Every structure is written in C-alpha cells, then in structure tokens.
Amino acid sequence: MITRIQILSITASLFLIGTTVELIRQRQLEEKYAISWLLTCIFFLVCSINLEIVEFLSDLTGVAIPSNFLFLLAFFFLIIVTLSLTVMASNESRRSRKFAQELSILKFDVEQLSKRFKHFPFNKETRQGQDKPKKNTEGDIA
C-alpha cells in the first residue's frame, strides 16, 4: 500500500530529477556536478518506491528508524556538497588573486615602457601626420 508520504517523496524525487535535467539542458549545471545530483535523486526515488531498501539499510547501519537513516544520508550529502563548493571557492579565489597580481605587473610594465618611450617620434602626436601617404615633389604618392 502506498502512503501519502510515499507519494509526496516520489513526487519530490521526480521533480528534482526533472529540475536537474532541465538545468543540464540549459547549461546552467555542468555534467560533472549533475551526475552526483542525478544519482542522489534516483537513489531517493528508488527508496521512495521500495521502502524495504531503506529498512534494510537502516538495519544494516544500526539506525533505529528508517526515516532517520534518510536524514543521515541527506546530511552527509549536504556536507559533501558544502565541502566541494568550499574547494571550488578557494580555487577561484586563488585564481582571482593570481590574475590580479599578473594584471598589476603588466600595468606597471606598460607604464614603465610608456615613460621610457615618451619622447620618441612614434608617440601618438607625431604619428598622426605620418599616417597619411607622403607626396614627393613630382606629385606621385611615395
């Protein structure tokens, strides 16, 4: 017999699977992260359909109430997601800092080159007249 909570959990699992697939299709969720989400959603869908799996796993791990086992799994999943997001944020912070340092070095180099070549004839003011083709004395374009 299917209970109301079972219908609700099946519906929620199907909704999560559909949402994940739509996010993949719209390229808002990368495939490497989507696999873990899809596997988790499918696992919860299977557990929602067949409650004996949850009872078996809770007995195997020593958890007294099967629903507490699901909460334990969800907690571990959220810890893993949080850890992976923290690693990604750390990597992006490191990359951002490195790019800012490289940009500062390049900006400094450009300023130094600009100061060094400030009085040479190929600066912007003297080059404006040189961009046009010169005419020689016979009227031909040189």
Image (spheres, rainbow, N blue to C red):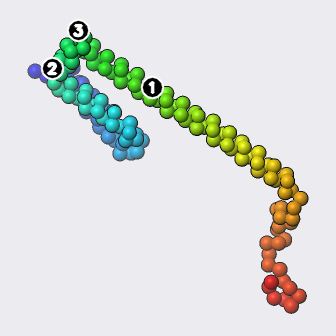
Q: Which residue is labeled 2 in the image?
A: 52
- Mark 1 or mark 2: name the one nearer the start of the chain: 2
Residue at 80% in and 75% down: 132
Q: Position of residue 86 (x, y in %)?
A: 49, 27
- Which numbered disc, 3 or 2, marks the residue that appears first in the sequence? 2
Left or right: residue 94 versus residue 131 is left
Q: Nearer the viewer, residue 90 or 40?
A: 90
Q: Amino acid at mark 2?
A: Glu
Screen quadrant of the N terminus = top left
Q: Amino acid at mark 3?
A: Ala
Mark 1 to mark 2 CA distance (whole Å):
31 Å
Q: Residue at x 82, y 67 (%)?
A: 127
Q: Quadrant of the C terminus?
A: bottom right
Q: Which residue is mark 1?
A: 83
Q: Residue furthest top?
A: 64
Quick one: SS at disc 2?
A: helix
Does residue 91 show up? yes
Disc ID at residue 1: none
Quadrant of res 45: top left
Q: Is residue 92 left or right of residue 78?
A: right
Q: CA distance from mark 3 to mark 2?
A: 14 Å
Is the residue marked by circle 2 packed among few (<14), some (14-19), or many (20+) residues within 10 Å? few
Mark 3 element type: loop
Total count of labels: 3
Q: Position of residue 73 (x, y in %)?
A: 31, 20
Type of the residue with mark 1: Leu
Q: Hey, which quadrant is residue 58 in on the image?
A: top left
Which residue, given by chain and number where applicable, does mark 3 sit on? 64
Image point (54%, 30%), residue name: 90
119 with respect to 67 (left or right) = right
